[in-house]
Amino acid sequence: MTATHPAVTPYACVIGNPISHSKSPLIHNFWIGKLELEAEYTAELVENTPEAFLAGVLGDGNWRGCNVTMPHKQAIIPYLDSLDPVAAKVGAVNTVVRQDDGSLRGFNTDVGGFLEPLTDLLRQTHLFRMARIVGAGGAARAIVTALAAENFVQVLAARDTAKAQHLLDELDPEGEHHVAPLTHFAEPTDFQFDDREGCCDLIVNASPLGMREQPPLAFDLSHVPPGSIFYDIVTDPIETPFLKAAREAGFQAIDGYAMLIGQAAEAFEMFFGEPAPRQHDAELRERLIA
């Protein structure tokens, strides 16, 4: 499908299938409005491969690029001219930018978007860092890559443990990581955690579990070391049962809008040449929740 837009307005878009649920147009157009830019951002349904869509926009100098969501994050790679090193490492692209020479370069802003709310934490020195991650799909690829670069030992829980092991072997073959069945964290444990002073523990839901119309994530809090930080990338609902239980138990919790807004901000600057006006994040969150 070819994007529809005013003939002389710089524009970008998000492509995927389905696409009507995407919050990217709200986010980008909110920033465009705050900066009073002559630009726009749309959502485009791309049902099959991205090849026909890219052919339709490639010669248009007003098209700045696109964000890429499921199921095209890996399928789009063969149609690109180059990959940013982070995207090449992850093996998935969520942002395509038209370069000055007309070539297409793929980026993965999910890595930076995921790490953004952890910036202050990761500036600290830790004796040991561990992340317990649920999910081995496309989102997990970016998260495993991000945390491997920050020296986390990772435990990846998934329905398909062989898939999880393959993901870890591919993305961080030198890391001392582990896999577990999804049910592992659902059952209570009497494990006694050692002294966690100087340690950094993350509990991450990188799966669709807990999303609207999906089953909740079964995660027993007996698996959680003291002082852990919970992080759920699900955005609908923004307060998942997983995060609600964590907050009620006194843990710090990071919701899916943190990653969503962070990854969008990186893409926005690449598309439109202006930093996203992040001083309006609180208002943006209100718009997203409404």
Image: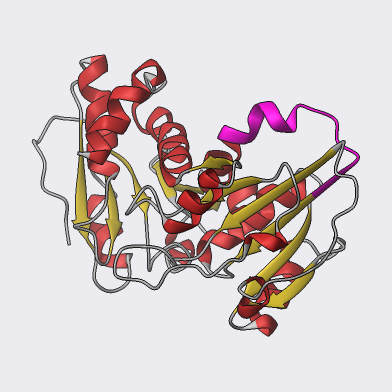
Q: Residue at x 74, y 70 (%)?
A: 189
The spot of residue 79 in percent (x, y) is 43, 62
| Above or below 163: residue 128 | above
- Quadrant housing the N terminus: bottom left
- Check residue 121 for magenta coloring: yes
- Which quadrant would residue 15 be assigned to in this image? bottom left
Q: Residue at x 63, y 48 (%)?
A: 86
Q: Is residue 184 left or right of residue 102?
A: right
The span shown in magenta is: 117-129
Q: Count numbered badges in the picture.
A: 0
Q: Nearer the viewer, residue 202 or 66?
A: 202
- Which quadrant would residue 61 be assigned to in this image? top left
- Which quadrant would residue 159 be assigned to in this image? bottom right
Residue 32 appearing in the image: yes
Which scheme is used to colour this image of the protein?
Answer: secondary structure
Q: Is residue 141 left or right of residue 270?
A: right
Q: Is residue 159 left or right of residue 45?
A: right
Q: Nearer the viewer, residue 54 or 15?
A: 15
The spot of residue 139 in percent (x, y) is 52, 60
Q: Nearer the viewer, residue 10 or 282?
A: 282
The spot of residue 2 in percent (x, y) is 16, 56
- Quadrant housing the C terminus: top left
